[in-house]
Amino acid sequence: MIKALFRKQFAELISQFSKKKSGAQNTPKRGLVVFILIFGILYVSLGFSFFTLAKELLGGLNENTFPLFYMLVGLIATAIGLLGSVFNAYSTIFDAKDNEMLLSLPIPPRRIVLVRVVSLSVMTLLYAGAALLPSAVAFLFYAKTTVLGYVNALLLFIPLVLLVEAVTLGIAFIVAAIARKVKNKKAVILVLSLAITLVFYLLYFRAQNAVTKLAAMGEIPSALKYALFFYYAMGRASQGSALSMLVVVATGVLAFLLALFLLSNNFVKFTTSKKTPDVKGKKGVVKTASLRLSLFKREWKMFASSPAYVMNSAFGVIFLIAIPIFALVKADTLRELAHSLAEVFPHASGVGIAAMLSVFTGGMCCVTAPSVSMEGKRLYVLRSLPISTYDVFAAKVAVHLVVTVPPTLFLNVTLAAILRADALSWIFMLLLPFANALFTALVGLCLNIDFPVLDWTDEMTAVKSGVGVLIAVFGIMITNVLLMGPYFVLVPFCSDGVYIALLTVLYGIASLIMIYWLKNVGRKKFEKLG
Amino acid sequence: MLEIYDLTKRYGDKTAVEDLSFTVKAGELCAFIGHNGAGKTTTLKCVVGILGFDKGHVLVDGVSIEDDPLEVKRRIAYIPDNPDLYDFMTGMQYLNFIGDVFGVAETDRKERIQKYSTALSLTEEEIGAPISSYSHGMKQKLALISAFLHEPKLILLDEPFVGLDPKASHVLKEIMRDFCAAGGAILFSTHILEVAEKLCDKVAIIKGGKLVTFGSMEEVKGNSSLEDVFLDLEENDD
């Protein structure tokens, strides 16, 4: 029975990556190969960065601070691992559309939970592994420890992933427990997930900051050993301590089992006694709107009503708002940094760096990347109505612009004002958010048209899985990083304003090419979907 | 109102619909009958423009779905067998969305929503509730109201009676008759042969993607029942 459940769960997971490209004649296997190839490239690129970081860190440690290496690696892997599953756990476990069907079969609920948790753990492992694996390789090459220390270092990923999964499941448990008692469940899930995640990351950044500072001080205070005892024990295990390894394994396993126990025992209660919206609503009001506004409102509701969609596609908005607030607090420091930059590059004012930050942070949001997949089996509604496909595309892009342009403008205006940008920089700092957001939205849309996932049973599959979403998220990030390169080539010869203008124009040209593709190819592909 | 000529739709090597031809005139109510997998839903989806097809022509009110799909869609309404509606909207928000798409004026919208929701026993409070809280039958009723909202010329319904309570089924039959009496046309698929026999002027029977019989109800069933005719056709071909 459990085998059948695993087969079903993983077949669904794999099928999202092995779909036929829309309108293409390639085989499903080819889709999987494309996914593995892209994932491999990204993994190797990320791995190389972590390997370099780990190598440098190892070089600066002494015998007393040696445990700091795995403390830091553990914290980084925890943060990345959580990204892989924390936003998905509630939706994957409690909101899957096949829950009722599975519960009607003679399957013990704990097995349903176990299978779902294992599939979440695979994602956690994949994400956390991006930091853990290269760090372990660097450790084997550059660290000096005992044989047991090396063995422990290679095995530490198991208890760490279990602990991360326990935290994830714990958050899902709290969210589910509160959500079932409230009326507006989706809004509560969104706010709770956001609040808990923000608190976690706040604590995480403080801990990471403390560990990094301590690496330079030469010793680890006792208070920190107790506060981060799991991570300190990881560090001690890498020194060859069998007892510490035992503590790490026991903590990870116990935390995981406790979380699994909590979820298994409450699964039926949380899944079947959810407070569903009252079928007696308020009296509806007949309101007319233009077709385009109505399409936009429909698209907005589809986005805003799904916590999973919001958390995975627009989480970066928090950074777009937090960065300028932080910049206002540290305005003087920023000006000093810009002044130092100008001493090296006479034309530089620091606004160019601000533009890069804006572009990179804005690129962390891509509302359009799952927007076609989110239509799911309801796609027939759009397809059977007299709506031009191009209007549908425009509505999807518009939602992305509404979500990302205002906070990006806030970031750009704040940084331009603090850094006292010149007229040219001001103009393009105001135009850049539009050009960059349009580019990001179009990349996400084009890729989702090419790689849609429409037959999902769990909303998270549409939001997070699939080759299109993967390429969009990482592709946009890599493109933005590559576009930063010219700054350092150009800055000795021209002003920051010219660089920002160049960036804006490049995004504009790329957007025009994609609009041409959507009009001539994407439209036909979309009309063949469903 | 609806003209289908030599319609052929293939999925890879499998031919789902082959050389299908029939017409439904204004004022006619036509039942579309066939066993599971016979090609009924595929045909309906081709007519609506959701699916492209390999051969043939489909004309609605003289307009070709291939040449001007948007114009065809303005003249029709379609409800699938299991209407997945936008569960992130309330019933009224959904009706407003459909009304906006077809440009239905506010007064007409109010009047028609009132008329059909009263007939189908969907209260104002229920229409104001989120679609996610609806039962299958309520979704079906909402989809039906939305179908009649813009006064289409042709309505295509895939298994419209599934999930409806007896009263709503009865009302729907009356609405369908009234709609056709006023000059509209309906093509609907069903497995309930008694309903088709009592309700329809015409019947099309499809088997293995091919039309096996088509004509007025009297011509097709003669002195026997539609059920007997259907079962005979099934057995004869076997």
Image (cartoon, rainbow, N blue to C red):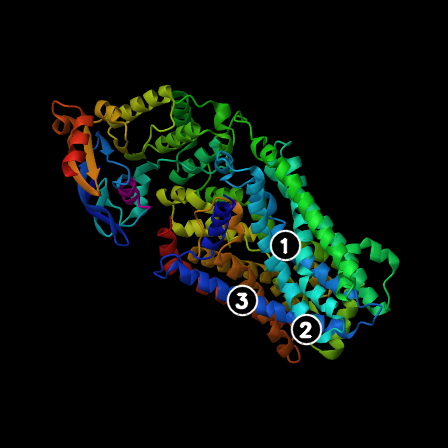
Q: Residue at x 44, y 23 (%)?
A: B122
The amino acid type, in three-letter code, at marker 3 is: Gly
The secondary structure type at the circle numbered 2 is helix
User: Considering only vertical position in the picture, is A130 above or below B10?
Assistant: below
Q: Which residue is nearer to you in this view: B161 or A503?
A: B161
In reply to whether residue B49 is colored magenta, the answer given is yes
In the structure shown, which secondary structural element does the residue marked by tag 1 occupy?
A: helix
The kind of secondary structure the magenta stretch mainly shows is: helix
Q: CA distance from mark 1 to mark 2?
A: 22 Å
Asked if badge 2 and badge 3 are on a common chain, one would say yes
- At which x and y percent is residue B114? 42, 24
A190 and A52: which one is in front? A52
In space, the residues marked 2 and 3 are separated at their CA atoms by 18 Å
Q: Position of residue B27 (x, y in %)?
A: 22, 29
The percent coordinates of residue A519 (x first, y second) are 39, 58
Magenta-colored span: B41-50
The numbered mark, 3 or 1, whose residue comes first in the sequence reads 3
**Separation of marks 3 and 1 at Cα, in angstroms:** 19 Å
State which chain disc 3 sits on.
A
Q: Tell me the residue that label 2 is attached to.
A: A52
Which residue corresponds to the image point at 64% horizontal and 31% vertical from the top-left?
A181
Q: Which residue is mark 1?
A: A83
Callout 2 amino acid: Thr
Residue located at (45% from left, 41% from top): A290
Tell me the quarter of the picture where residue A351 sits.
bottom right
